[in-house]
């Protein structure tokens, strides 16, 4: 079988764009997400030369994660690339006013979910003495901003997890790449603002945000460098952005 990439959060945004890019490059894919209809629609777009397996689970549900990954047949367990793309922001408010359920959603999805999936897949990579894990962090993992404390904390955790995975897995020939994008136009802001499309649109007004395809291109690059090369950490902004709060917009 050709190489296999396992992608969480594949039903939208960066995960979806990465699936398309890697399929074009000849990968077989395990597409993971919560929404079967979206994953089926994505599968129908992919080149027929790519074998595609769909797994439906919420990364926050540890039992689902474990049982879905355990259900893979032996040949599908030869996972070469894990893209931990699932994750979201919920709310944009100060610590003392924000909704504690939003904190749970972010810590459970962005941190614990990523860990559950990785915990299930890393032993397979260790056994084969090869593999590449790509963790989607954020500029929020590098710099904390007002009203985003828990989201930033969850992404700082991703940074720590990437660093720790690299320390523990290099010995087994497994690469770990941490990718921290700035503003990418996806459903991210729509989810953060709980469906308020007007508010979400404003985040990307007056400049050209990154597109999910830009991050997919980066992922495609890091998985295709020579085997001797390990790209550890990448920070990517749109041209108009200089920090989380500094974006130059046209008037
Ligand atoms: C998304 C980027 O700046 O909205 O992770 O936190 S930001």
Image: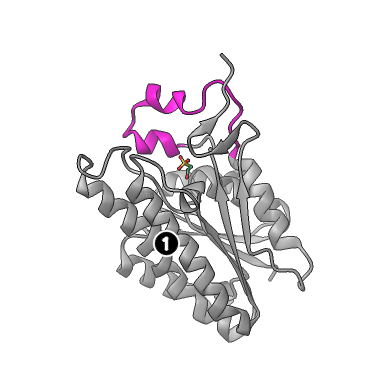
Give residue 143's position: percent from left, percent from top. Answer: 47, 49
Q: Which quadrant of the rendered structure holds the N terminus?
A: bottom right
Nearer the observer, 107 or 42: 107
Q: Which residue is mark 1?
A: 157
Q: Is residue 21 above or below residue 28?
A: above
| 205 inside magenta stretch | yes
Is residue 204 inside the magenta stretch? Answer: yes
Q: Quadrant of residue 97?
A: top left
122 and 111: which one is in front?
Answer: 111
Q: How many marks?
A: 1
Residue lying at 37% horizontally and 55% vertically, measured from the top left: 153
Identify whether 42 is placed above or below 25. Answer: above
- Choose between 81 and 99: the one closer to the eye: 99
User: Which residue reaches farthest right?
Assistant: 226
Q: Is residue 68 visible?
A: no
Is the CB of mark 1 within 8 Å of ligand 1?
no
Q: Which residue is drawn at the image coordinates 38% and 44% (left, top)?
A: 89
- Name the spot of residue 211 as percent of width and height, x first: 60, 37
Helix, strand or loop for disc 1: helix
Which corner quadrant holds the C terminus?
A: top right
The residue located at (66%, 57%) in the rendering is 50
Q: Which residues are magenta?
A: 187-211
Which residue is located at x 31 percent, y 69 percent?
Answer: 63
Q: Give the quadrant of residue 227.
A: bottom right
Q: Is residue 27 left or right of residue 82?
A: right
């Amino acid at each position: 079988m050709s190489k296999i990439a396992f992608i969480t959060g594949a039903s939208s945004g960066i995960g979806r764009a990465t699936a398309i890019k890697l399929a074009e490059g000849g990968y077989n894919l395990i597409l993971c997400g919560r929404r079967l209809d979206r994953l089926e629609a994505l599968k129908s777009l992919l080149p027929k030369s790519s074998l595609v397996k769909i797994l439906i689970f919420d990364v926050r549900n540890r039992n689902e994660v474990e049982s879905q990954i355990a259900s893979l047949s032996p040949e599908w367990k030869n996972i070469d690339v894990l893209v931990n793309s699932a994750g979201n922001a919920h709310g944009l408010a100060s610590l003392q006013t924000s909704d504690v359920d939003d904190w749970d959603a972010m810590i459970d999805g962005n941190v614990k979910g990523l860990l559950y999936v990785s915990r299930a897949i890393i032993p397979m990579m260790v056994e084969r003495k090869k593999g590449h894990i790509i963790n989607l962090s954020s500029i929020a993992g590098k710099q904390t901003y007002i009203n985003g404390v828990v989201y930033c904390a969850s992404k700082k955790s991703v940074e720590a997890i990437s660093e720790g995975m690299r320390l523990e897995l290099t010995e087994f020939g497994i690469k770990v790449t941490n990718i921290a994008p700035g503003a990418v136009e996806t459903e991210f802001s729509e989810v953060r603002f709980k469906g308020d499309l007007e508010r979400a649109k404003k985040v990307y007004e007056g400049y050209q945000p990154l597109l999910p395809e830009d991050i997919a291109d980066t992922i495609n690059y890091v998985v295709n460098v020579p085997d001797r090369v390990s790209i550890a950490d990448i920070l990517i902004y749109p041209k108009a952005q200089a920090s989380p709060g500094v974006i130059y917009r046209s008037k």
